[in-house]
Image (tube, grey):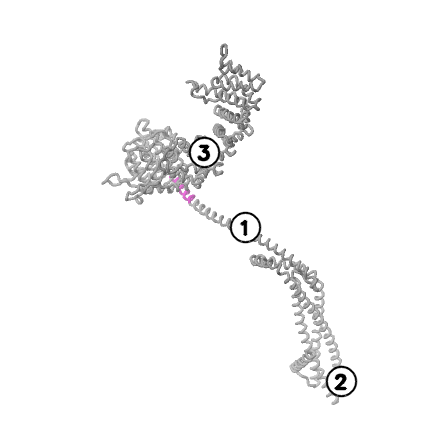
Amino acid sequence: MNFLRGVMGGPSAGPQPSGADTIQKLCDRVASSTLLDDRRDAVRALKALSKKYRLEVGIQAMEHLVHVLQTDRSDSEIIGYALDTLYNVISNDLEEEEQEENSPKQGDDLGSQFTEIFIKQPENVTLLLTLVEEFDFHVRWPGVKLLTSLLKQQGPQVQQIILVSPMGVSRLMDLLADSREVIRNDGVLLLQQLTKSNAAIQKIVAFENAFERLLDIVTEEGNSDGGIVVEDCLLLLQNLLKNNNSNQNFFKEGSYIQRMKPWFEVGDDNCGWSAQKVTNLHLMLQLVRVLVSPTNPPGATTSCQKAMFHCGLLQQLCTILMATGVPADILTETINTVSEVIRGCQMNQDYFASVNAPSNPPRPAIVVLLMSMVNERQPFVLRCAVLYCFQCFLYKNHKGQGEIVSTLLPSTIDATGSSVSAGQLLCGGLFSTDSLSNWCAAVALAHALQENAALKEQLLRVQLATSIGNPPVSLLQQCTNILSQGSKVQTRVGLLMLLCTWLSNCSIAVTHFLHNPANVPFLTGQIAENLGEEEQLVQGLCALLLGISIYYNDNSLENYRKEKLKQLIEKRIGRENFVEKLGFISKHELYSRAAQKPQPGFSSPEHMMFDHEFTKLVKELEGVISKAIYKSSEEDKKEEEVKKTLEQHDNIVTHYKKVIREQDQELEELKQQVSTLKSQNEQLQVTVTQQVSQIQQHKDQYNLLKVQLGKDTQHHNSHGDTLQVNGIQVEEVSKLREELEDWRNRHEQLQGQLKEKDAVIENLKSLQLETGTEQSSQPSSSGGMEHSAELQKELELLRTQIQLQAAEISKLQAENQKLQAMNTAVDPALGASGAVASRSSEKEGRLLQELGELQSEVKALSEEKVSLQQQLDSSSSTVAILQDEKSKLQQEVAEAKKEQDDLLVLLADQDQKLSALRSKLKDLGMPVEDEDDIESGDQADEDEDGDEEEQD
């Protein structure tokens, strides 16, 4: 301890040791001491000397300090001292009172050199990442600061070591979740340095839920009203999103754009904006612009623009835009932000066109902004922002272009003058005495004509009243008049850009321009003169305008045909000189600056010369015009023919595109209808499936109940073998009844026929008897007696046959009665089962009612299934039970048919014989009754026999 007192400056006898000697002794003590307390005290002493003797401590102690970090990890105090010492050596954040005049540069060099030495061994950085994971405050906080300092000094090298380290980035992400604000805030600073210009680490940090955590911190700190922590979080968010399409898409898909809306909810009282609030809001606006930057892929930008509209972010920005008391720099940045949110997005552009300023009477926001643009008392950056906003509003917005140009046309100008239109403001700025207003108005009007040939023709109708008593002149003529008056260079450049945009790809405008005889001589005079460097830009633009007049000339004016204009250039300027002057534009420094990005970025008004969209036009036309100057008349004719052919093809293509577009719309509609029908069909199928399953369940339940009922009624049913629970035997019995009824009818017909034949036979008998008596009283020959004997034998034979037939008929009647008895026996059995079913009706009442309702709902689907099921059940259940009875009945029926056929044959024979007997009797002279009399007699006999049978 006496040694430490000497080191720390305590009283001691003898000469004081130098700083280098003391540091060397302390390093030896750290390296050789076996006691942890001695090493801890030595490291603490090195920490105290590290700020004053930075170089010496870095050279002599760095290796020992790293060794301490490796071996003494169990003692958090010595680890903290070692980390603090390394931070003091490597960091360049020295206190001002300790800095000398030349120390900052030396400090930068020292920090970079010591960092290079430290990271030469990558395991040192890996060790540091392990220490950062420690929860102990005295270890984690110094480790975070040291790692941040390493990243500041040698960022790319340290980033690569952390990237290849297992879970290196994930370990650092845990710092954002630390409950100690100091560590959390320094963790944000560490991640700022870690994510600089490294897309791979940016993606890892983003997918480690960085957006969610950072936005939570911003919300906890009070959004724009928060302190410097909010600023640090916003800077980190910018690092993660800028020029990183993957993270931008992840930010949008994660619905984080919606969480940005509360940032811009400023109150009505906008006075007293703190400097930190202005900084925070400025960074928030820049973050919005990062998501919708024109340099992003168009698809990603459009999706972010739509998301900002749907979540109300654009509306909130427009509220700030029209609010009062907003600081100028915030207002300027808000205008730039709104510009990029609406650029190229029709939905957002339409909304912006509907925004009104809170004035009396209300004015459109576009008009209010244009008033600021043409007002020379407004700040330069604000006027540039308004111009950019107007350009973005008109970008790919034909509807907005038409609305702006329509305010200039005679039919739409407000004659009362009660309100100022956008067109009037642009014309006022175009012809004002302020050259910056001239330039801004010319560029704004050029954007209203961009890629819109119809509006270029419409703008030719605009007439301006120059002074009282003079006739009005066209806008085109007034622009050329101002050019010829020799105004400022900025004004002439703006007007020439407007004219070039106006005349390009519009032959009618070229004709109007050439119709003024003073225009071509003015242009050739400007191009031919040898002027200073300031005028070279004007000469180049004049050459471009004259070249456009040649290239888009339709030769409708005889004096200004293409060939004559080329000859004029050859004679007065020279083709080589003309092409050289034309090249002045693209070689100009300001042209290169303007071509870089759409937003006007001029350091001063004097540098405001070129517009971004105009640079595209120059790039497109410069080579074409140079070639057109050297072409002959024949080549021009061929080119005209080619142009006409191309125009025809373009018209055809446009027509087919229109047809295809209409067909696409129809296809989309049909697809929607098909998808709707498919969904409905699927729903109906699901419903039918559910109902069928329900019906099947109810059927199963119903059949189970019927089976139970069948078991209960078996002891009541004497014919249980022939009855089934499902009622199919009843249908078979009914069929048998019908067959029996048919056989009864046939039997009755046969009986009737037999009775008729019996009656005929009886009549013949009676006739025979009468004939016999007469023959006994009178003498007759022996031949007649013999004949009558034969007849008698035949009659006896007929009687025996009839008796046999009667016996067969009685047998059939008995079988018929037997079947009727079986039929009548079935009815009581069914009645008994019905009685049992009525007793169980209370159990199945509700089930039957529900089944009836379901069957009525799906009647169309169930009828076919039920009929098929009944047929299947019928065929399967009746075949086994009634097969024997059916075979017997069929046998008996066949025998009965055969016997009846035999009877009919016999009866026919009898008829023939009877008719033969009648004829013989007539031949013998015997009286014979006619068939009619016999039939009437037979009918009477049948009536008598019927009465006797009834009495019996």
Q: Furthest residue to the left?
A: 469
Q: What whole-number distance in Å separates the C-alpha atoms at marks 2 and 3?
A: 151 Å
**Amino acid type at mark 2:** Met
Mark 2 or 3, nearer chain start: 3
Image location (x, y in percent) of residue 54: 48, 18
Taking depth in this image into account, of 536 and 883 the one nearest to the observer is 883
Q: Within the magenta stretch, is there residue 307?
A: no
Image location (x, y in percent) of residue 848: 60, 59
Image location (x, y in percent) of residue 328: 36, 33
Mark 2 or 1, nearer chain start: 1
Disc 2: which residue: 785
**Amino acid type at mark 3:** Glu
Mark 1 residue crowding within 10 angstroms, few (<14) / some (14–19) / many (20+) = few
Q: Is residue 941 left or right of residue 539?
A: right
Q: Is residue 759 visible?
A: no
For numbered disc 2, what is the local secondary structure?
helix
Disc 1: which residue: 682
Evaluate if marks 3 and 1 touch, with contact meaning CB atoms under 8 Å apart: no
Indicate which label's residue lies in the foreground, 2 or 3: 3
Span highlighted in magenta in the image: 640-654
Evaluate if marks 2 and 3 touch, with contact meaning CB atoms under 8 Å apart: no
Instruction: Give the quadrant of the N terminus.
Output: top right
Image location (x, y in percent) of residue 503: 34, 38
Identify whether 839 is placed above or below 636.
below
Q: Is residue 870 left or right of residue 410?
A: right
Identify whether 126 is placed above or below 215.
above
Disc 3: which residue: 221
Q: Within the magenta stretch, is there residue 650?
A: yes
Q: Quadrant of residue 348?
A: top left
For numbered disc 1, what is the local secondary structure?
helix
